[in-house]
Image: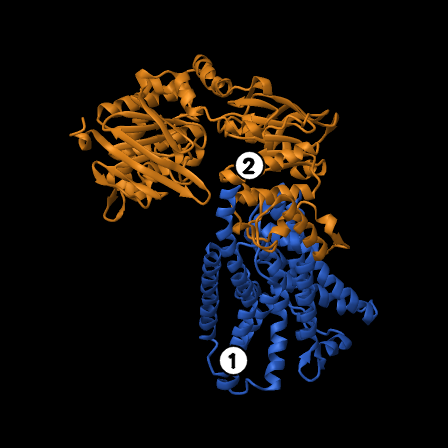
Amino acid sequence: MQTQERIEKPANKGKAASITRRFFYLSLREAGIGIALVIITLIFCIVAPYFATTDNFLKIFVQISINTVLAVGMTFAILIAGIDLSVGAVLALATVVGAKIMISKDLPVELAMILAILACMGVGIVCGFINGFITERWKIHSFIVTLGMLNIARGASQVVSDNATINGLPQPFVDFGNVIIWGIVPTIFLITVVIVGIAWFILKYTVFGRYIYAIGNNEEAVRLSGHNPAVYKIMAYTICGLCAGLGGVVWLLRLNVGSPIAGVGYELNAIAAVIIGGTTMSGGRGSVIGTFLGACILQVLNTGLQLMGVGDNFRPIVIGLVIVLAVILDTYRAKYLLNARRV
Amino acid sequence: MTTSQDKVNILEIKGVTKRFPGVVAIDNVDLNIERGEVHVLVGQNGAGKSSLVKLLCGMYQPSEGEILFEGKPYSPHRPEDAFKVGIRIVYQELNLLSYLSVAENILFEKLPRKNGLVDYKTLNRKAREALEEVGLDISPQTLVEELGIAQMQLIEIAKALSNESKLLILDEPTATLTPREISRLFNIIHRLKQRGVTIIYISHHLHEIYEIGDRVTVLRNGQKVETRSIQAVTIPEIVKMMVGRDMKEEYLFRSEVVPGPEILRVEGLRYRGNPHSISFGLKQGEIVGVAGLVGAGRTETMRALYGADLKLAGDIFLNGKLIKIKRPKDAVNHNICLLTEDRKSQGLIVDMPIYINITLADLKQITKGGLIERQVEKKAAERLVKDLGIKTPSIEQTVRNLSGGNQQKVVIAKWLFRKTEVFICDEPTRGIDVGAKYEIYNLLWELAAQGKGLIVVSSDLPELLGICHRIIVFSKGKLVGQLERSEFDQERILELAYQEYINTGIENAKMQPAS
């Protein structure tokens, strides 16, 4: 017993120290991304003409919305160490299905609008569920399954729309999308923030959220603790699909057309936002708040560079560098944490 | 002898110690390997054989002491260093690249080249020669993934032989081989010996060592017991050295805890890859030990029972009622739990806080309407941390930061929170330092005293002798015997554990068709 005391005591001191360091570090983690966002924004306010104007911020809020909604869903997929490449295509399918229903002459306008929104969400839920089910039932990597879904949903959106954009959405719907609150917050941004808030709440306070983090960290331990991880993983993919469907609704509110070419390449923007937001590709670590901040950084960079006159050709280069830089910084964070543990 | 020692000894290990946090894997070992001999290393599981190999190949660095190879200081830091000086190692685990060809695997360290490209002609020719040497009749272009395990093992050996070596280390090379292949391997060893290659041979199969060995060294608890000439030692003597006479754990047994009625009964359990059926029972308040060598099927049996891996057949009765266990979830719902052999990768979520790990198996208790009640959760976790004496500054601490013993306590806390009745503990004290071991034993006894049934799989025989009411022994997938506490005898148990390896060697040899 005496030896025990001797061994454990100094270790405890070290642990206490590491806990303090960890605490500061973890709170710094999301804060760090937030600080980066503030710094980037401030720099652009100074160096980029017109950046610090109400109009510009309004524009950023509008442009940020779709990617944020997709990225929130993507956070769920990546937290369980999966991925969803189909969100852009599912968004397109949702927009054409939603638009089709909305312009239907047989339904009263209000009913058509409600049905259309539900249909968008339904399309997302179905696609996401199929992604999850196939991934889990046959243990195929989600990269491949959702790559298949990307093509299927894109093709389906072309079939549904006859490969043409669908115009003529009802006026009340269009008007709703154009409402701006307090002269700076567009409705679609408000919707986005609500979605972020709900996702944050789910991940932080529900049993489901607990399982998502636990599975991402160690699926086998969760299984051996008497749970069925497949159920929760399928739910995560379904939520990711639902977010793609909601992304479709936001698209319709913003652009007022259903389009089979909507959202091409959006999955990559969503992944970028998640990664910049500090969620690790190996799963189990990250948050939707981080994702939201990541999406903001991407959009602020894009707009700011544009206003500074950096051409369309060069902007992707800068943004690409930022993504890689964010991940490099993340490896330093990991090393720091490891050192903190060793102390 | 003493004057020309440098020339006689190809390898000298001088006072080497390897410590891990809380554990001493190798404890002040002195070992000389003479040039040209076949030196056999034996010892129980965890005696330090594999750690010694890892020191020699550079995967571990000694905490103290030095190693001389051919008279020169040798301190490898990575496997390439061992390769460079001419030490070849065939590891216990297979390290082949499944999607490459046999030839590429055999010559991977030194692929023949021509103009900067791989010279496939030479590669395949050399590989064919190497295959002939180990007597494998397959094309060098075959992909490794198409081979059986025994064939893969021979490829590992061929790989080690394909490069000129001065010292060849074989870590349990016969574990997966059939008798025919084993005798071929022995021929190879004889041939190598004639060529002047020194060989360190690690084996569980004591009868084998008389066929090939010159000297034998017995390890126990990381210490060297003795080195002897094979001719001058008998199997029972070796067993005695392996076991030691260390019985101080005796007092752990609490005679006041008397087992009650049977709680669990396993009938005819079979899992994939094992022809034997296994049946045994467990009483309330009883601790049943499961002894056997590594690979004897103990872990596999427990995992099949728990539903962690596929079960082919077998009925499980809980309190006399037949229950169906298809996956861990079913077992947990019947209040059966498994403390896995590998805590870190299977039992715990090491990067999450203690309290999350404790409540993981039963979140229902702390949720209301799908929401987790953190206050209730933390209170429950804090109580268990205190009850079990888990040493940590806070329940928010990530499990990774805890010592092995405290990690194991977190696992036990998890199942106590779930109010489990049957505990299957696979190597509950592996990698845990001595002081913490006793705390774990006390906890196990506490559970037994509460009327819970415990199955304890352990490779540490004194531990089983110290804490169990009853010990069942596995040998090569078969349940070969059962001993009540009054019959406990280390040598008898070891004899049983080795039984099938000795017997089936002969039986298989008879039954083995010439393929």
- Whether residue A206 is visible: yes
Residue at position x 64%, y 68% in the image: A259
Q: Which chain is orange?
A: B
Q: Residues within 10 Å of mark 2 (few under 14, many from 20)?
A: some
| Residue toward you, B405 or A327 | B405
State the CA–CA distance, disc 1 to disc 2: 64 Å
Q: Determine whether the residue tagged by mark 1 lies in a helix, strand or loop.
A: helix
| Residue toward you, B1 or B353 | B1
* Foreground: disc 1 or disc 2: 2
Q: Which residue is mark 1?
A: A304
Same chain, labels 1 and 2: no
**Percent x, y of residue B462:** 51, 27
- A215 sits to left or right of B139: right
Quadrant of res B15: top left
**Percent x, y of residue A303:** 54, 78
Location of the N terminus of chain B by quadrant is top left
Q: Which chain is blue?
A: A
Residue B94's place in the image compared with A180, above or below, is above
Q: Residues within 10 Å of mark 1 (few under 14, many from 20)?
A: many
Q: Which residue is mark 2?
A: B438
Quadrant of res B17: top left
**Percent x, y of residue A58:** 63, 81
> Circle 1 marks a residue in which chain?
A
Figure label count: 2
Residue at position x 32%, y 41% in the image: B108
- A219 sits to left or right of B508: right
Q: Amino acid at mark 1?
A: Gly
Q: Determine whether the residue tagged by mark 2 lies in a helix, strand or loop.
A: helix
